[in-house]
Image: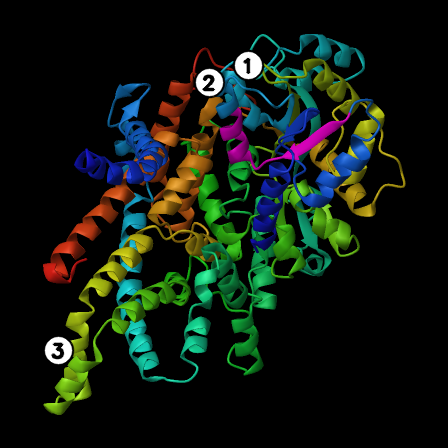
Amino acid sequence: MQNIKKTWIPYLLIAPSVIFLALLFLLPLIQTIWLAVSEGGAPSLANLRTMAGDLNFRLAIRNTFLLALAVVPVQIVIALAMGSMVAKVDGGRETILWVWTIPLGISDLAAGLLWLSILQNSGYLNSLLFSFGLIERQANWLSYQTPIALFFAIAVAEIWRGTAIVMVIIVAGLNQVPKEFREAAEVFGAGPWTRFFRITLPLIKPALQSALILRTVLAFEVFAVVYALGGTNMPVLVGEAYTWQNQNQNYGVAAAYAVLIMVISLAATLVYLKAVRVDPERLP
Amino acid sequence: MKRSLFIGLLTASSLFAGTLARAETIFLSTQLRPIEEATAVRNVILKDLPAPVEYVVEEPPQFAVRMEAERQAGKHTISLVGALHGELSPIAAKDGFVPLDDLAEKLQGKGMPKALLDLGKLGKDKQQYIPWMQATYVMAANKQALQYLPQGADIDKLTYDQLIEWGRKMQEETGQPRIGFPAGPKGLMARYFQGYFYPSFTGGVVRPFKSLDAAKGWESFKQLWAVVNPNSTNYNFMQEPLLADEVWVAWDHIARLKEAVTAQPDQYVIFPAPAGPKGRGYMPVVAGLAIPQGAPDEPGAKTVIEHLTRPETQILTAQNVGFFPTVDAKLPSDIDPGIAMLAAGVDATQHAQDAVISLLPVGLGDRGGEFNKVYMDTFQRVVIRGEPVADVLNEQAAALSKLMGDAKAPCWAPDAASQGACPVE
């Protein structure tokens, strides 16, 4: 009797979360997939064909991948540097961390609008450049004629906004590295770089893996910052889904985009799980 | 540029959240959303009604989703909707509205033009909506720009060649492109192509989509675009770049110019859009009132419609929000000078000798968004990406032809009437 009770109690305890997710996640997911691969209630690839034949499709894929490639590595490096530096600080560590995580509390749309106020024609950047005599009149940074400046602006805004979350995960990982390892390496004469690459980095692999997965999936979902800064000047995947849903009122093609984004995110997660292998003993 | 838009969105959703639990006649509108306008509707325009009305606003995409959700669920909270012709059309296509023929008959007797009322049938036998207010698109210019107007050009009779010349001169003399179009993600640029560009250059909208005239028009638009501010693909409401002094000459919906013109009536002039070889295209904008099937308070909604279409209320509406009457109502002389300027601009547009009226699309059902996309994609490819005009027109014509066929939409003015779906020639 006691044993039976013990076997079903865990299931009972996790049941609410499973039911909750099934109702509010799995069900809509299945509906979305069906919406993408059906037309008028019958299975059809018409939506996928419309999506792939659309004039912004390739551009959106290219831009989304380029942005992820540009943003994620920079964020990981910056977060590692920030995390390592703050580890050496004794007094005021909490305050520094708190300041660093301020962008986390800002919604992506607000972050986009903030950068818009800096970079738009009558924005702070142009005012500054003008006051130094570097430009004679308002310069365009966010127009379709300046795609590189626009890409750079969006990348910078994304890096500013999204690095904090990576840093939080990495700091948590760094905190778990036992001091003794580092001290032992120091005794054997390892320099700071050797210690970092041979001791710290391998030991924070689980944290690194989580950070990479989280940040990359989020990078594929980039939207609000791009929308605020570039409008439709730089198409990205989620932006296209939004346009098909709201402007074009074609829910099928919007669903096809949503499914595509999900597939890309899942693939990226799998790649990280394989590429950044974590020692099974270090898993909980 | 986009800040006001997002703030509007936030207020719209928060207003909405607070009003769900009330039991009054709920009036949901996609028009008059900004807080000042919504307040004017609540406190001035709807004030004298016997029973209280809850005025709720919603962005057009959310409006469509909400109406569809209520229709599918069969649980209705909204008794009256106010939205644009094109926003009501998909709902009417699914028989979502109560026929309003009795009201239409009454209003025709009171002088609402039949042509306007017929738009409210949306191509069906029964009256789907009652025309509520109307507007159109005009050009606005900062008075600083007038000194660069080409010699001999009359601003009220501008041609495309003169506009290009004007833009070139402004760019040369001031070092900046000074013409602007609302080609941003929330801008109304598609309406420019459907109601102004195509009728002016080809005399049609769908039939001559890939004609030689259209190709010539696109070549000339490319010349114009060379002197247009490149930030135009970010502009949604032209009043913002006008007020920021970034743009001096702009085309937009009167409601999206209103803020600039009413704030500084001495600084701007309003005039009709330019004319092309086939005349001066223009498109009226009609917002309508409709009652959803299953509305909890149908009689209440009808009372509101009758109230809103009374001449006094229509004048009040024009004074407060800058949309113009659909019934015979004369605007008073002490009206806000900005609104008076817009009214004069609308009048000049409607009564231009070479005017080519382009009616609102009828019968596209829920494909209106994709119809816009055909024109915007053509613009994107020809003008922004510089692809060869003939190839783009051929490919987009195929998409347009398929769309018209799928929707089985017959031609509307200025295209000649068709039997069955409107053909692309």
Q: CA distance from mark 1 to mark 2?
A: 9 Å
- Which segment is the magenta one? B52-67
Q: Nearer the viewer, residue B104 or B179?
A: B104
Q: Identify residue type, mark 1.
A: Gly
Q: Which residue is mark 2?
A: B409
Residue A118 vertical placement versus A57 (above, below): below
Kindly indicate the quadrant of the structure image that contains residue B177: bottom right
Residue B344 vertical placement versus B153 (above, below): above
Specify the subunit that label 1 lies on: B
Specify the subunit that label 3 lies on: A
Image quarter in which the N terminus of chain A is found: top left
Q: Position of residue A258 (x, y in %)?
A: 32, 39
Answer whether residue B65 is magenta in the image. yes
Q: Position of residue A138 (x, y in %)?
A: 55, 69
Image quarter in which the C terminus of chain A is found: bottom left
Q: Identify residue type, mark 3.
A: Arg
Q: Earlier in the sequence, mark 1 or mark 2?
A: 1
Residue A102 vertical placement versus A42 (above, below): below
- For the point 32% across and 34% down, the residue is A19
Left or right of B107? Residue B58 is: left
**Circles 1 and 2: CB distance less than 8 Å?**
yes
What kind of element bears circle 2? loop
- For the point 58% across and 54% down, the residue is B3
Q: Label 2 crowding class (10 Å Cα cut-off): few <14, some 14-19, many 20+?
A: many
Q: Which residue is mark 3?
A: A198
Specify the subunit that label 2 lies on: B
Q: Label 3 crowding class (10 Å Cα cut-off): few <14, some 14-19, many 20+?
A: some
Q: Which residue is mark 1?
A: B123
